[in-house]
Structure formats: structure tokens, C-alpha cells
Image: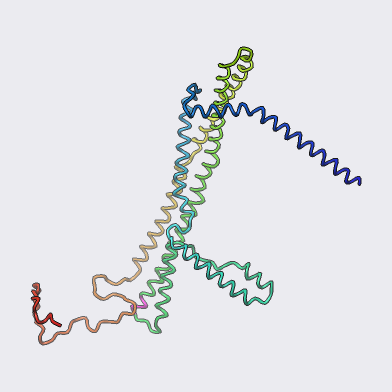
């Protein structure tokens, strides 16, 4: 019983504390409500052009606001574009269908394995087992995969491949390896842009720009409150002038202080901006990728024996050698061929079937 009484007493005290706190908060809201309502009304009137007596901010402050807005837009606009590097398959839209097919195969495999499970533990292990490691869904990896598959198809097409088929299979295999290396270089580029350039832009927006905007918002609020106080003083009755003047002067000081603080904050944000350094990081990542790709592609072309496009013979899958490189002649063949255009009559017997 004593334990219950102690609990009831403690709970009662907590309820009293909560009630007291809520009463205090309600009183604060009630006190601030008229001022908040006046500020809101003043802001609406200014936007509608109904009020022209608006306190002017220093020109330096206004210039800093423009620069902060420009910096914000630059970061936002770049991120709208460079965030594409965070989407692995930005150069391979077909990945959606491939992903669905891969998911279907994985689910089918797990269902089949589960049907063979002989215990709960074995079934749980099958469910929790990670899926097969897949190549990133990028265009270069897709090219690598299709080249490798094509090379394997040629090797399986016959027990005795022709020299041409062997060459095509070998080149496809080399091309597959080339595209894998290009794909890896692209992934490295994307990772660098994502973890360096994009990250820095987001930090600038979420911390520096946000800090400046918070300071500017405080300036706007204090300016509204000060202008409301000025208007109230102008329209005050004589018996209230003294108290309203004190209120106005206090808000004037606060307005000046927050304006000075916001000016300093915006100056710091602009001074600490390293956008060009961040942009250099983006360019370096791209340069590394393009240089690596160019080197790999050049080496592949230089070290691969391709057929001469000027000759009639070309490497073809399943092709058979021609019977003779020189056309046969008959007794009726004219030894010296006339290269002038041959004029055919529409009624010529040779055109009849």
C-alpha cells in the first residue's frame, strides 16, 4: 500500500509540474500573439503595396543578400545536373528491364531452393543468403557482357572453328575486357564526383547558406517588429507614448544588432566559399576518366588485327572461302571489256524470262 501511495504522490507532482509548464507556455503565447499578428499583418500589407514607410537596410547588406542568393542558385543548379552521377545507370536506361529480369531469376532460384530445404534452419539460411554479385548496370558493362556472351557463342557453335571465327571470338573477348576497364574507370569518376563535388555543394547549401538565410530571416522579423512599433508610436494616444517609445527604441537596437550579425555571417559564407576548388575536383575526375578511356581504346585499336576494309574479303562468322579470287571466263567472254555504259533496249530478248 505504501508503494502505491508513493507512486500516486509522485505522479500527482508530475501532473502539477506539467500543468504549470503548460500554463506558462500559454501565457507566453498569449503575450506574443498580438505582436506576431501585427507583424504578419504588416508583412501582408507591404506585399500588397499598402504600406510604403518601410525601414531601409544598408546597401552593403542588400549587396551581400544578392551574392548569397547567387551562390545558392549556382550550387542548386549544378546539383540538379551532377546528381545524375549518383544514379549508376544514367547512361543505360535499359537497366530497368534487366533489373526486373534479375529479380525474377533470384526469386525463382530462392523458391526452388526453399522447396528442397529439409529443416527450418536450412530454409532460413536460404532466405538470408545474399543474392549473386551483379555488375553495375552501366552501358560499358552491358557492352562487356554482350561481347563476352558473343565470344562464348562462337566457341560453342562448332568443334572446329575457322581462322576467321577464332579471330572474331578473340577480338570480342578483348573488347569485353576493354569495356570492363572503361566501366570501372567511369564508376571511379562517378564516385569521386559524388563524394567530393556533390557532397561539398550540399554542405554549402545545408550549412553555410542555411546559416546565412537564418540570420537574414531574423533581420526580416526584427525589421517588421520595429516598423510596427514605429507605426504604433505614431498613432499612439498621449498616455501610451512613453511606453511605446521605449518599446520602439529597444526594437530599433535589436534590429541594428541582428543586421550587423547577418552582415558578418554573409561575409563569412562568401569568404569561405570554395566553389572553384570544388569545380576543379569535378574536372579532374572527368579528365581522369576520359584519359583512361582514351588510352584503353587506343591500345585496343593499335593491338587488334582488324580486316582491311579496302579488300573484298572480310572476317565473317561462319563465312566460307570464295571458290576463286579471279572470275572464270568462257569462250563467249570478250577479252577486252568495254567500260562504256551498256544501253539496253526495253524490248531486248535478253530481258525476257
Q: Residue 47 in the image: x percent, y percent?
A: 48, 29
Give the answer, above or below, for where 6 lies relative to 183: above
Quarter of the image with the C terminus in it: bottom left
Q: Residue 8 in the image: x percent, y percent?
A: 85, 43
Taking the view exactly as shown, the residue that stands out farthest to the right is: 1
Residue 157 placement: quadrant: bottom left
Give the answer, above or below, for where 209 lies relative to 171: above
- Would residue 325 be found to the left or right of residue 93 on screen? left
Taking the view exactly as shown, the residue that stands out farthest to the bottom is: 331
The residue lying at 8 percent from left, 72 percent from top is 340
**The magenta stretch spans residue 166:** yes
Q: Residue 222 in the image: x percent, y percent?
A: 57, 27
How many numbered circles are shown?
0
The residue lying at 40 percent from left, 56 percent from top is 290
Taking the view exactly as shown, the residue that stands out farthest to the top is: 238
Residue 262 placement: quadrant: top right
Q: Nearer the viewer, residue 166 or 213?
A: 213
Magenta extent:
163-167
Give the answer, above or below, for where 203 lies relative to 218: below
Q: Nearer the viewer, residue 14 or 312?
A: 14
Main secondary-structure element of the magenta-colored stretch:
helix
Give the answer, above or below, for where 182 lies relative to 341: above
Q: Nearer the viewer, residue 173 or 59?
A: 59
- Would residue 93 be found to the left or right of residue 108 on screen? left
Its colouring scheme is: rainbow
Q: Nearer the viewer, residue 12 or 320?
A: 12
**The magenta stretch spans residue 332:** no
The residue lying at 55 percent from left, 36 percent from top is 211
- Would residue 182 be found to the left or right of residue 223 on screen? left
Q: Residue 160 in the image: x percent, y percent?
A: 38, 84
Amino acid at each position: 500500500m505504501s508503494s502505491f501511495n508513493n507512486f500516486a504522490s509522485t505522479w500527482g507532482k508530475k501532473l502539477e509540474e506539467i500543468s504549470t509548464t503548460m500554463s506558462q507556455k500559454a501565457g507566453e503565447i498569449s503575450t506574443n500573439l498580438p505582436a506576431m499578428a501585427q507583424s504578419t499583418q504588416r508583412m501582408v500589407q507591404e506585399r500588397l503595396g499598402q504600406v510604403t514607410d518601410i525601414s531601409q537596410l544598408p546597401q552593403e547588406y542588400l549587396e551581400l543578400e544578392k551574392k548569397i542568393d547567387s551562390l545558392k542558385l549556382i550550387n542548386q543548379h549544378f546539383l540538379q545536373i551532377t546528381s545524375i552521377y549518383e544514379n549508376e545507370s544514367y547512361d543505360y536506361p535499359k537497366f530497368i528491364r534487366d533489373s526486373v529480369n534479375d529479380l525474377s531469376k533470384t526469386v525463382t532460384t530462392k523458391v526452388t531452393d526453399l522447396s528442397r530445404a529439409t529443416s527450418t534452419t536450412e530454409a532460413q539460411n536460404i532466405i538470408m543468403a545474399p543474392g549473386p554479385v551483379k555488375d553495375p548496370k552501366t552501358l560499358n558493362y552491358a557492352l562487356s557482357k554482350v561481347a563476352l556472351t558473343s565470344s562464348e557463342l562462337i566457341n560453342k557453335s562448332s568443334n572446329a572453328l575457322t581462322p576467321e571465327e577464332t579471330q572474331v571470338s578473340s577480338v570480342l573477348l578483348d573488347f569485353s575486357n576493354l569495356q570492363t576497364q572503361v566501366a570501372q574507370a567511369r564508376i571511379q569518376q562517378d564516385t569521386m564526383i559524388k563524394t567530393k563535388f556533390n557532397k561539398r555543394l550540399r554542405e554549402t547549401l545545408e550549412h553555410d547558406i542555411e546559416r546565412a538565410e537564418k540570420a537574414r530571416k531574423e533581420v526580416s522579423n526584427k525589421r517588421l517588429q520595429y516598423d510596427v512599433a514605429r507605426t504604433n508610436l505614431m498613432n499612439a494616444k498621449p498616455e501610451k507614448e512613453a511606453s511605446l517609445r521605449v518599446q520602439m527604441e529597444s526594437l530599433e537596437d535589436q534590429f541594428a544588432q541582428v543586421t550587423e550579425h547577418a552582415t558578418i555571417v554573409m561575409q563569412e559564407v562568401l569568404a569561405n566559399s570554395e566553389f572553384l576548388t570544388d569545380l576543379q575536383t569535378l574536372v579532374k575526375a572527368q579528365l581522369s576518366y576520359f584519359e583512361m578511356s582514351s588510352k584503353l581504346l587506343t591500345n585496343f585499336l593499335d593491338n587488334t588485327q582488324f580486316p582491311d576494309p579496302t579488300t573484298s574479303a572480310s572476317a565473317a562468322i561462319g563465312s566460307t572461302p570464295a571458290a576463286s579470287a579471279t572470275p572464270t571466263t568462257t569462250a563467249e567472254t570478250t577479252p577486252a571489256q568495254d567500260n562504256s555504259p551498256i544501253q539496253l533496249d526495253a524490248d531486248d530478248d535478253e530481258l525476257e524470262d
